[in-house]
Amino acid sequence: MSGLRSYYPEIEPFDSGMLDVGDGHSIYWERVGTRGAKPAVFLHGGPGGGLSPDHRRVFDPDKYDVMLFDQRGCGRSMPHASLEANTTWHLVDDIECLREMMGVERWQVFGGSWGSTLALAYAESHPERVSELIVRGIYTLTKAEFDWYYQFGVSEMFPDKWERFVSIIPEAERSDLMGAYHKRLTSDDRAVQLEAAKTWSLWEGETITLLPDPSLSDRHSEDEFAIAFARIENHYFVHGGWLDEGQLLREAHRLKGIPGVIVHGRYDMPCPLRAAWELHKAWPEAEFQIIEGVGHAFSEPGILDRLVRATDQFASR
């Protein structure tokens, strides 16, 4: 594994704040790097995952001015775990509000996992605002992808973890596990909500890396993280992200002319490689990298290496 690129050094924001985006929501944002350098926006996963300090560290701080933010309802954004006025299209509008606040015409868009979904939705809606697009762990929110992770597929790879995931749902409700969880995650009973949230969240925390990573599963078990993560993610998924089936791939022709990189782990469990392969065919101008011997998480060595190389490659554009 010698020669693999890793994170830039730890860095603190040079500016941060809360932005009132309407609908009762206020989102936390921060900027890192060098004010006035190449603009970029980082879109975190989940939905509902929030920011981590490591997200700041995939960009050369001397060459980039990076906007990062906690999407509606998660991280430091308020109100916590709120599902009201919280859809893909609200977030696309929020990204535009942040771009206008930053005062830039175009910026690099970087997103992984759900962040790749949001990046594609934004870039297809506002292609003229995107200088480059870097996406990792592609997820296009189709029924086949949902079924693979929440009904049958990954269940066969992780039968031990799956047993715990379905254990809180009665047999009669198991034909629609996303719906069964939705009922519990929106329950008025906090204890019911929390049990469902932690179980939902841990299923993801324990299946996103090729090899177990206790730091990820521990974070997914924290009460406040799990409540926002599970409620918001499930809310988005039961509504299909407010996208028509297959919409992101169908609209990928709008990305024509945008330089890009697609990075995907061969053994990505939550986001099967087929979606990335189909995106590659629909957007052939983008560089396509299948990373062998890894799963889904952006922190896995081969994936992180390729992402840092991608931001470096565009740093002087």
Image (cartoon, rainbow, N blue to C red):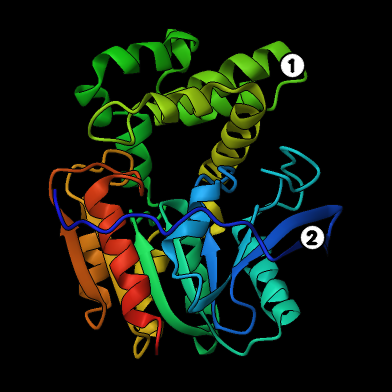
Residue 184 found in image quarter: top right
Percent from the top left, x then y, of residue 147? 34, 37
Percent from the top left, x then y, of residue 114? 46, 52
Mark whose residue sits in front, 1 or 2: 2
Residue 18 found in image quarter: bottom right
Vertical arrangement, residue 257 with respect to residue 186, above or below: below
What residue do we see at 22% from left, 79% from top? 284
Q: How many marks?
A: 2
What residue do we see at 59% from left, 14% from top? 195
Q: Which residue is mark 1?
A: 190
Q: Which residue is mark 2?
A: 17
Q: Which mark is residue 7?
A: none
| Camera-side residue of 293 and 182 | 293
Is residue 285 visible to the viewer in this orientation of the structure?
A: yes
Which amino acid, by three-letter code, is at mark 2? Gly
Percent from the top left, x then y, of residue 308? 34, 64
Vertical arrangement, residue 160 with respect to residue 262, above or below: above
What residue do we see at 33% from left, 40% from top? 270
Which amino acid, by three-letter code, is at mark 1? Arg
Q: Secondary structure at mark 1?
A: helix
Vertical arrangement, residue 280 with respect to residue 151, above or below: below
Is residue 176 visible to the viewer in this orientation of the structure?
A: no
Give whichever of discs 1 and 2 has the lower sequence position. Answer: 2
